[in-house]
């Protein structure tokens, strides 16, 4: 099956038009990069406006009301224009090269995480088989930029911010990875698209409702992810009341705004991972797919890739909207938490991670591996209903490129239940 | 000209990443500021991860990013932050150290070059008529390096053993080394925690 935005899609279309393979893949990669960077750049515009509105409402104010009509829609755009005009300052005590480079490092790391965000069935910039692992790997790079920014600023506020960030993110990565492993254990795949596909149907198929351990893992993951993108109440790297503005105290203008684009981008990235891993990805959860969208995929002529009909575009567009809405809801919860809870102290942040969240996530990981055995003892099957992992594997095998059935049958042992 | 274009198309990404890896490594050696060295190491190690991605080894590339760039380098910079006396530490090496490091580097390079020249770079698995590849085993349909790596860490090598007869002995995987390495890591962690604790008590 071909997909428009799946890497195979555009590249195969170009190869059909007699481009050389490398040129086709290069052009396809460029198109994917441009599409993703537009989401990555426009989402913060919306989120910053939303943040101010949410903050205003929670503090019993109105938030922005003037710029661009009644609701202040264009507030962020006006802010952006202001930031571009500002002077690009660099303190005298700073290490100039590192000071100038670190915003880009943060930006690139955050943007790279979007490579494996599954927007809709097959609509993903690069469908890596190690999607979840890749995501965790590139998210861990963002901290480098923050530490270098704090260190190279030549300011004690920034240095303290950078050090706190290093301690905090390095600690919180561990429970985050373990919590991300819980749904991976249930499904037996690290591929983002396959993980989302396995959660088709009613919302009871979502992994968050698969078993009690997954249910708890979702909340632990979300807490830890909020901390790892340094959002309040875990924003010790900024901590306005103690450190002026933490690691970005010395930054101004467009470099400063890169940090914020990266922060809001990462907020959506971790929310998107939570959506894909726990909340059914692009599926509505009310059975709309089986009733309407799957028949729709057969409808219409193929454009422009063979096997990809007009109906597929409509169905995928609906899926993409569902995915983005779910992600935005989680981002909204992060904002809600930020403006409701007071900031923790640094020792409380570290204690919460190392003494509570890490053991809890280890326990959940252990629990989810034992769960099928426990269920088997009582019901004689490894899961209530059809096991999710079983459902995912044949579906993926059917959909992926034709391969030798004999070889794959030998390599993928069937789950005997 | 056309040959050059097709060479660029085939090996362009590899050449860019290789140049970045080598250039970053050279910059690490030539820089005297510790934190800038760490920055050039990011470039160098990240480019090595890019090489892995360009060779379709997703898992190894992601592991390179996670372990070296996201883990080791963060700890390195963190260590510099905690131990450095001045804000920007610079290192100047004496000529004796230069000679020592240079000879060690030349020795290592000669070993690597010797090994690289000795290996027959023909894919022996693909040319084995009874091998798994001849039977239709396709690495890229098996999740590139992920599943083969997972299988071999569990002690099985389906990429090599698929065509073997039952009486033949199977290729051994990496279960034992894998376990030894994980136990070793655990020992290292416990040891590090122990050392850190005792230091704190004395002070």
Image: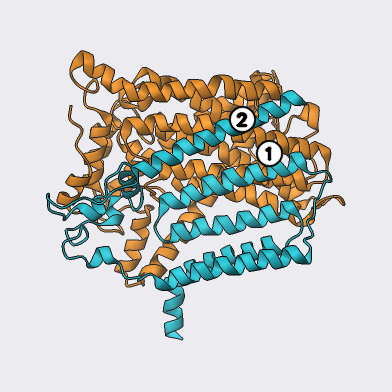
The colour scheme applied to this rendered structure is by chain
Which residue is at the far top?
A: A378
What residue lies at 28% left-to-right and 46% top-to-bottom?
A311
Q: Chain of mark 1?
A: A
Residue A403: x and y, percent?
20, 54
Q: Which mark is residue A75?
A: 1
Residue B167: x and y, percent?
12, 50
Residue A368: x and y, percent?
36, 23
What residue lies at 40% left-to-right and 45% top-to-bottom?
A130
Dots 2, 1 in contact, CB < 8 A: no
Using the rendered image of the protein, determine whether residue A224 is visible from the camera's viewpoint. Answer: yes
The relative height of residue A14 versus residue A86 in the rendered view (above or below) is below
Q: Colour of chain B?
A: cyan
Residue highlighted by disc 2: B193
Using the rendered image of the protein, determine whether residue B19 is visible from the camera's viewpoint. Answer: no
Dot 1 falls on a residue whose secondary structure is helix
Q: Are marks 2 and 1 on the same chain?
A: no
The relative height of residue B40 versus residue A221 in the rendered view (above or below) is below
Q: In front here: B108 or A4?
A: B108
Residue A235 as seen in the image, left or right of residue A354: right
Residue B201 as seen in the image, left or right of residue A359: right
Q: In front here: A66 or A369?
A: A369
Say which chain is orange: A
């Amino acid at each position: 099956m071909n997909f428009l935005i799946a890497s195979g899609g555009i590249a195969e279309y170009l190869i059909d038009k007699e481009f050389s393979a490398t040129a086709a893949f290069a052009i396809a990669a460029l198109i994917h990069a441009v599409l993703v960077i537009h989401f990555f750049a426009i989402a913060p515009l919306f989120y910053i406006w939303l943040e101010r509105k949410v903050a205003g409402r929670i503090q019993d104010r109105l938030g922005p009301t003037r710029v661009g009509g009644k609701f202040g829609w264009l507030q962020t755009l006006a802010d952006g224009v202001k930031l571009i005009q500002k002077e690009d300052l660099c303190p005298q005590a700073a290490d100039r090269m590192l000071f100038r480079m670190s915003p880009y490092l943060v930006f690139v790391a955050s943007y790279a995480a979007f490579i494996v965000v599954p927007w809709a069935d097959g609509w993903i910039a690069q469908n890596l088989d190690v999607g979840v692992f890749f995501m965790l790997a590139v998210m861990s790079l963002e901290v480098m930029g923050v530490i270098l920014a704090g260190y190279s600023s030549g300011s004690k506020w920034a240095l303290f911010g950078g050090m706190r960030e290093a301690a905090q993110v390095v600690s919180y990565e561990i429970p985050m990875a373990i919590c991300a492993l819980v749904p991976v254990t249930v499904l037996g795949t690290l591929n983002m698209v396959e993980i989302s596909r396995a959660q088709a149907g009613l919302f009871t198929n979502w992994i968050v409702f698969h078993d009690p351990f997954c249910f708890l893992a979702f909340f632990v993951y979300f807490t830890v992810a909020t901390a790892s993108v340094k959002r309040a109440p875990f924003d010790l790297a900024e901590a306005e009341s103690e450190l002026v503005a933490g690691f970005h105290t010395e930054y101004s203008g467009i470099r400063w705004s890169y940090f914020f684009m990266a922060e809001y981008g990462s907020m959506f990235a971790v929310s998107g991972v939570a959506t894909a891993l726990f909340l059914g990805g692009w599926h509505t959860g009310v059975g709309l797919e089986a009733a309407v969208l799957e028949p729709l995929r057969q409808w219409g002529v193929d454009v422009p890739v063979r096997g990809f009909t007009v109906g597929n575009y409509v169905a995928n567009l609906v899926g993409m909207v569902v995915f983005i809405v779910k992600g935005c809801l989680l981002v909204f919860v992060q904002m809600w938490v930020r403006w409701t809870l007071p900031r923790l102290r640094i020792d409380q942040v570290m204690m919460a991670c190392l003494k509570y969240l890490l053991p809890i996530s280890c326990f959940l990981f252990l629990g989810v591996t034992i769960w099928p055995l426990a269920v088997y003892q009582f019901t004689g099957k490894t899961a209530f209903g059809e096991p999710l992992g079983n459902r995912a594997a044949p579906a993926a095998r059917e959909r992926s490129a034709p391969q030798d059935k004999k070889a794959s049958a030998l390599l993928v042992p069937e789950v005997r239940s | 000209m056309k040959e050059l274009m097709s060479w660029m198309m085939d090996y362009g990404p590899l050449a860019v990443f290789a140049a970045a890896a080598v250039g970053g490594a050279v910059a690490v050696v030539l820089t005297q500021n510790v934190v800038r060295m760490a920055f050039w190491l990011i470039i160098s190690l990240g480019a090595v991860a890019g090489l892995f991605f360009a060779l379709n080894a997703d898992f190894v590339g992601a592991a390179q990013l996670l372990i070296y760039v996201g883990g080791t380098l963060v700890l390195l910079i963190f260590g510099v932050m905690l131990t450095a006396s001045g804000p920007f530490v610079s290192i100047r090496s004496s000529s004796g150290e230069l000679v020592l490091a240079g000879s060690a580097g030349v020795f290592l390079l000669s070993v690597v070059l010797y090994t690289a020249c000795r290996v027959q770079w023909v894919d022996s698995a693909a040319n084995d008529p009874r091998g798994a590849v001849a039977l239709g085993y396709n690495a890229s349909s098996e999740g590139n390096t992920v599943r083969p790596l997972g299988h071999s860490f569990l002690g099985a090598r389906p990429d090599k053993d698929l065509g073997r007869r039952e009486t033949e002995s199977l290729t051994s995987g990496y279960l034992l080394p894998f376990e030894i390495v994980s136990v070793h890591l655990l020992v290292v962690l416990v040891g590090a925690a122990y050392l850190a604790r005792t230091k704190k008590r004395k002070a």
